[in-house]
Structures are given as structure tokens and as C-alpha cells.
Image (cartoon, rainbow, N blue to C red):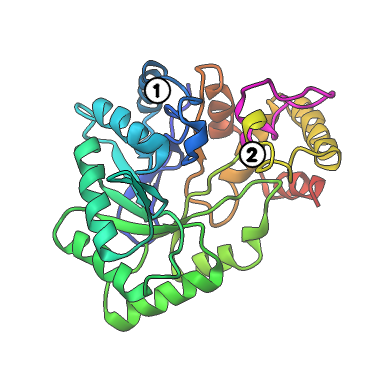
Amino acid sequence: MAPVRTVPLGATGIEVSNVFFGAGTILGVGSFPHLLGKGITAAEALSRLDEAAARHISVVDTANAYAGGGSERVVGAWLPGHDDVLVCSKVGRPVLVDGIRQGGLSPAHIARQFEASTARLGRVDLYLTHFPDPETPIAATIDALASLIADGRIRAYGCCNVTSTELEAILDTADRRGLPRPGWVQNPFNLIDRSAEEHLIPLLRAEGLGFTPFAPLVGGVLSDRYLEGRKPEPGSRMDLMAEEYAYALNPATLARVAELSRRAKSLGVSTAGLALAWLMHRDGVTAPIVAPRTTQQWKAVDEALTFVLDRRLADEIADIFG
């Protein structure tokens, strides 16, 4: 078992572990209603949370929409006695409200969903907008989030799934209104999807924001799981979300993963461990979000936390994927 390091979460003044635990597979898979019940069980989740705490991982990342609120309920049941762990939740994805699916980032929806999340979790320390809401003025959303900070309900807020252009507009609006800026961004980033490198990461670094990327292993593609012609198991996340992962689960990409696997073996580390180590060492990355479904899947995280990756090796690994 490898210990984590403590790093600043952007310019928020909050110290966090350099790995977050992702609760998006508890009782379901993300926010998809048709995948409710396809995630790990509550008992399995409590074990994974204990294993995360044993590694001193200090942030659990969940959302109001994960498993229809089920993820928050399980995390909330575990949180008592773990005062050193920060809980991060999200708002914006459609959820059932009085039998009607409602989402967005209006002040009214944020207020209603924050109370619902707090009821399930007990507390919310960090709060993220799950997706941009083009129907609500940015200023209205920031006002609502700033009020939560001013009232001591949350410590900081951030943004998920934003482009650099959208983030610039958010920062500009916050600055013009003299209100707190978002402290970090949560977007996909990994060896296969490096689109954040072009504009987003340079902006984050220039503005002093943190970056907590999700999908670090692309659902297991960045491991040996799908090499040598192996197919997703029926009912697995990769099987159930085939369209979402089609960009990664193709012959050209798998050939690159096979090359990564050969390189990992020569270095005495697993393919997933090397992919995670590359991500953790990338400039601008604060803490990737990991979501082991089994005890055995912590091996890659432990390897990544202790693997020494210099600039030359990091560049060589990146070059495998072009």
C-alpha cells in the first residue's frame, strides 16, 4: 500500500491528496438511468472507501445524479468518523424531482439540489457544476455558488466538462462581479484523450486552477484487459457503454496500448500503473480520480504513487499515442 502526497487544490487554500476516490460506480455507472444497479454494491463500496482512507486519500468525489442519489447515500453512510476526508459533489445533470427530470444551473435548482445532497451526505465540502448550462446566465450560477461559500456551506467550487472558452467566460464573470472564482476543473484526460493539453491545461496553469481529471484509464482500456482480442464481458461497463468508449476500443488504439504494455513489462510495472503514473506526473494535473471496483484494482494506483517517472520517459510514453 502506497501513501499519497498532499498537494494544493489550485489557489483555494485547500490541501488535498494527489489522488481522489471516485464514487461514480457505486450502485450504478455515472449518471445514466439505464445503468442503475450495474455498479458495485453498497457493501463493496464501503470496502473501497475504507481502502481509500487507509491510503490517506482525502477527497471522495460523487454527484447528486450518480445512481439517482444512491452514490451520495452510501458515501453519506460512510462519512461519520472520517472528518479528515472531504466530500465533493456535483449539480447540473438531470435528476428526478417530483417525478420530473430536472437539471441545469439555475439558482433555484442549485439550492434545491444542494439541500438534497446535504441531506444524503451530511455535508458537502467541495461543489462542482457537472455540465455547463447555456439556459442560465453564468452570473446567476456564480452568485448561487458564492452564496454557499459566504454562508459556510461549502469551502470552494469548481467546474466539470468545460472548454477553455467556457472557463474563460466563467473566470471573467467572477472577476467582474468580485466573487470567488472556480478553484479547479474536472474534465477527461488520459493517454488516449489528451485534448485538454492544447488549450485547457495551459489556461489552468496560467490562472492557478487545479485539475482533477476523470477517466484516467478509459474504463480499463489503458490496461491489459482488452488486448489479444479479448472482448468486454457481457454486462460490464465497457459492454453497456460501448458507444461512449468506441473512440478508445478500436484496433489502432489497442495497438498503442499493446506497445504501452510491452514498455510497462520492461519497467516492472503494470500497464494501468504506468498509465496512471504518466497522468500523475503530467504538468498541471492536481489529482486524477480513480474508482477501483475491486481490492485488486488498487494495485495500479499503488504502483503509480511510487513509480519514478522522469521527463524523458514521460515523453516517450506520450509518443506511443502520438
Mark earlier in primary sequence (2, 1)? 1
Most distant residue in the bottom direction: 176
In the picture shown, does residue 165 fall above or below 183? below
What residue do we see at 81% from left, 36% from top? 254
Residue nearest the viewer, comparing 284 with 235: 235
Most distant residue in the front direction: 99
Q: Position of residue 33 (x, y in %)?
A: 47, 37
Give the labeled residue for mark 1: 45
Considering the whole magenta stretch, tell me its main secondary structure.
Answer: loop
Q: Position of residue 197 (x, y in %)?
A: 64, 61
User: Of the residues shown, which amino acid type is indicated by label 2?
Assistant: Val
Residue 150 occupies quadrant: bottom left
Give the labeled residue for mark 2: 218
Give the crowd class for mark 1: few <14, some 14-19, many >=20 residues within 10 Å.
many
Residue at disc 1, secondary structure: helix
Residue nearest the viewer, comparing 293 with 321: 293
Q: Are marks 2 and 1 in contact (CB under 8 Å)?
A: no
Residue at disc 2, secondary structure: helix
| 252 on left or right of 318 | right
Q: Position of residue 266 (x, y in %)?
A: 79, 27
Residue 99 visible from this viewpoint: yes
Residue nearest the viewer, comparing 134 with 296: 134
What residue do we see at 32% from left, 75% from top? 139
What residue do we see at 64% from left, 46% from top? 190
Number of the label disc, if any, that sits on residue 124: none
Q: Give the residues in magenta.
A: 219-237
Residue nearest the viewer, comparing 88 with 70: 70
User: Of the residues shown, which amino acid type is indicated by label 1?
Assistant: Ala
